[in-house]
Amino acid sequence: MRDKFLVFGSPLIEKDEIKEVDAALRSGWIGTGPKVAKFEQMFREYIGSQYSIALSSCTAALHLSMIVAGIGHGDEVITTPLTFCATANAIIHAGAKPVFADVVRDTMNIDPNEIEKKITTKTKAIIPVHFAGRPCNMQAILELAKKYRLKVISDCAHAIETEYQNQKVGQLGDIATFSFYVTKNLVTGEGGMITTDNREYADKIKMYALHGMDKDAWKRYSDEGFKHYKVIFPGFKYNMTDLQAALGIHQLQKLERRYKRRQAIWDTYNYKLKDLPLQSPAPIQKNNRHALHLYTVLLDLQAVGADRDSVLNALIRENIGTGIHYIALHLHPYYRNTYHYKYGDFPNAEYISERTISLPLSAKLTDKDVEDVISAVKTVLL
């Protein structure tokens, strides 16, 4: 057993990120300012989108996406039950109803065939979630959207580097939303981003994110002269700060280098865990790119002779932190009671929910950390 607990999802923060934050503090611009603008430009260029808007979280990005897409009371939005609650909650905050469609068991992504079964006259949008960084079947989803005249709002919280058929998923659909939470591949502590090619959406999101005002604060007080703002919409406080963007600027520059480190860890796990009673992540399809955000395995509970939580707690006793991605949303009390879901409604999501464990996968991990994870998993499962 290792001496010190290995925290799951601990981010790698280096000297240049710290220096950039220090520069922001010394500049006096610690709210939304020039570093946010720079980060937005860099992210836009990385994804290949026409527009990008930095926000306080991916949850904020999803909520604003609902609003600008015209989704509200009486509408339905189809998404996966195998996601973090923010995906469904953003739909609810807009006044609409989340409708779940089951996933494909091996990819853990939403099943387009199940999506079509859930489409009604009230359906206004689909939110595919690129689980763990694996791209959804976007061709099928976009065809459904065209057929039924639906919006596609991609939840790319796990999927900054993800590509589908050699195209970044942040370019696909009407809007894409990203997370820079502390456990993500690119971190700003908290934070998010929207990418879109729709100028009307981009303009509205920019305005709605800062109280519905028509000017950014840093532009109002620039040397171009004072500019009065006008409130156009009763907006929100969803803007990103320069302190967050200071981290993001350097994190983005290191994204591909850190991807290679996670790839090496991923390959090591695949090789050294292959003979254990678990199912490693499914192979990645040709012309697709997995963001390698989560290394999620499914336990063979019968062979292990214990339930998932017992295995998780045993790993904790070995000083290894893990994640659970996810307990399917329809099994949580709020969604079960509010929308009358029950066990058995989404069998593939439930199968995954009962068996899933995510192992540490961060560029911060040393070779010794990785070996400790492997050793602990073998100790617990064999």
Image (cartoon, grey):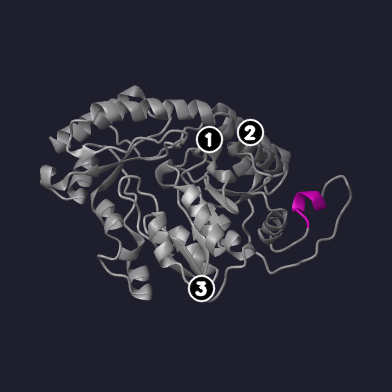
* Picture coordinates of residue 258, whole percent (x, y): 48, 28
Please state the horizontal and vertical placement of residue 176, each as a whole percent of the image: 57, 50
Task: Please identify, in this view, whether the residue under mark 2 or under mark 1 is nearer the observer.
Answer: 1
Where is residue 328, by image quadrant? bottom left
Q: Earlier in the sequence, mark 2 or mark 1?
A: 2
- The correct choice, above or below, for 48 with respect to 227 in the image is above
Give the residue type that dot 3 points to: Lys
On the rendered image, what quadrant is the N terminus found in?
A: top left
Identify the mark at residue 20; answer none if there is no mark.
Answer: 2
Task: Quote the CA–CA distance across marks 3 and 2.
Answer: 47 Å
Q: Quadrant of residue 318?
A: top left
Residue closer to the observer: 172 or 214 = 172
Label 3 crowd bin: few (<14), some (14–19), many (20+), radius 10 Å: few
With 233 as the anchor, is 336 left or right in this view? left
Which is more toward the observer, 319 or 39?
A: 39
Q: Secondary structure at mark 1?
A: loop
The mark that comes first in sequence, 3 or 2, is 2
Q: Which comes sooner in the sequence, label 3 or label 1?
A: 3
Give how far apart the Cα atoms at labels 2 and 1 are. 33 Å
Magenta stretch in the rendered image: 215-220
| Magenta stretch: helix, strand or loop mostly | helix
The residue drawn where x is 21% and y is 39% is: 278
Decide whether residue 244 is among the magenta residues: no
Residue tagged 1: 166
Q: Where is residue 240? Give x, y as percent.
A: 63, 50
**Which residue lies most toward the right here?**
225
Secondary element at image label 3? loop
Disc 2 packing (10 Å; few <14; some 14–19; many ≥20): many
Q: Which residue is mark 3?
A: 122
- Vertically, is 36 above or below 75? above
Total marks shown come to: 3
Amino acid residing under circle 2? Glu
